[in-house]
Image: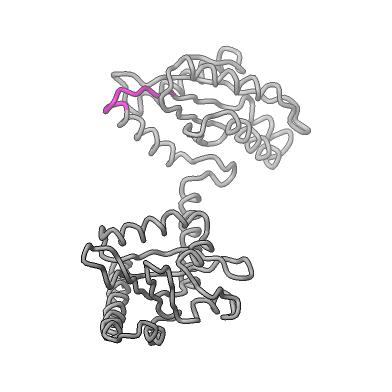
Amino acid sequence: MEKNEGENFLTQKYLNRIEELENVLSQMRKRENETEILSLPWVGNLGQWYWMVESNQVEFNEKKITNLGYETSDLPEKVGFDFFTSKLHPDDYKRVMDNMRKHLMNLSEAYEVEYRIKAKNGEYVWYYDRGKVTKRDENGKPLIVAGIVFDISKSKAIEIELKKANEELQRLVITDDSTGAYNKRYFLEKINEEINNYNRSKSKFSLIMFDIDKFKQVNDNFGHSMGDVILKRIVEISQENIRKDDIFCRWGGEEFFIVLPNTEKENAIVLAEKLRSNFSNYNFPKVGKVTASFGVACYGEDDVMDKIIKRADDLMYKAKSEGRNCIRY
């Protein structure tokens, strides 16, 4: 079953149960003694509840509380709406309250929300809650809200694990395994986005390309495992010095690119010089000093992707041919 179909199926199932609940309440309203409403039949895996808005009295199937580790003896004499809202996860509180407020104002068909609520042992349990105003006064003011609640912790745990797995899969797709930098595929994707931004708003971006000098000698003299250590440290130093929106990528071998959104060439040169200095001043274990050569290019009116990449590449090789451990732009 597709996700949307599954969601629609569950929503319809809950709607049917709400309708059943409303029918029960309709019969109860005919009774003169309002306290008889306490005998609501069990619905859902935690049961049902209703809230008398004016008196702020909440009645519910006791499983809603025992599921959280409470005994009925733990409850105050009068349970109000705030008894439950005070136990909401801080990140969910505003969303839940806004959802209920919107429905009370008759701006939505139902109060429907997922939230975390604190159990007696301090852990949070996921609930799905759906309710509806079943009675309003002549001015439209809500008098009774009735609903059903479900413990969805197991399905939520699966959903969270799937989300983590998808995020990890996405990370692997766009990340270089050896260094943790973004890979060439992601670099091409992001530079294309920056070109589209430039075409829309003329927002300039710059590229820094650098290559570690004499890296083959490092591998030959100290082994490829030490070469990997140096590559990872170079990536770490670079990531420590770039902005959150900058994109640091491994092009291949010991060559790297940095995409700098909203950046003029002059500011890109400043960053390149900072990186060059940090690399050359760092003392790598067993190896000592390692340097890199840099090329800096800024996207212009007549540029295309291949053109700016080649220009940065040519400038980087010019830096190598003119002594290494320097920047050309």
Q: Position of residue 250 (x, y in %)?
A: 52, 36
**Furthest-left residue in this view:** 138
Q: Is residue 20 magenta?
A: no
Q: Position of residue 25 (x, y in %)?
A: 30, 81
Q: Is residue 200 magenta?
A: yes
Q: Residue at x 73, y 33 (%)?
A: 221
Horizontal side, residue 216 vs residue 183: left or right? right
Q: Is residue 89 above or below residue 237?
A: below
Query: Dividing the picture into quarters, in which one does residue 186 lie?
Result: top left
Q: How is the image coloured?
A: one colour
Camera-nearest residue between 309 and 95? 95
**Furthest-right residue in this view:** 286
**Furthest-front residue in this view:** 32
**Furthest-top residue in this view:** 322
Q: Position of residue 31 (x, y in %)?
A: 30, 86
Query: Dividing the picture into quarters, in which one does residue 100 lie?
Result: bottom left
Q: Is residue 215 above or below residue 48?
A: above
Horizontal side, residue 206 vs residue 215: left or right? left
**Total labels drawn:** 0
Quadrant, the N terminus? bottom left
Q: Residue at x 46, y 63 (%)?
A: 115
| Magenta residues, start to end | 198-206
Q: Residue at x 60, y 32 (%)?
A: 240
Camera-nearest residue between 119 and 319? 119
Q: Position of residue 265 (x, y in %)?
A: 44, 16
Horizontal side, residue 121 vs residue 97: left or right? right
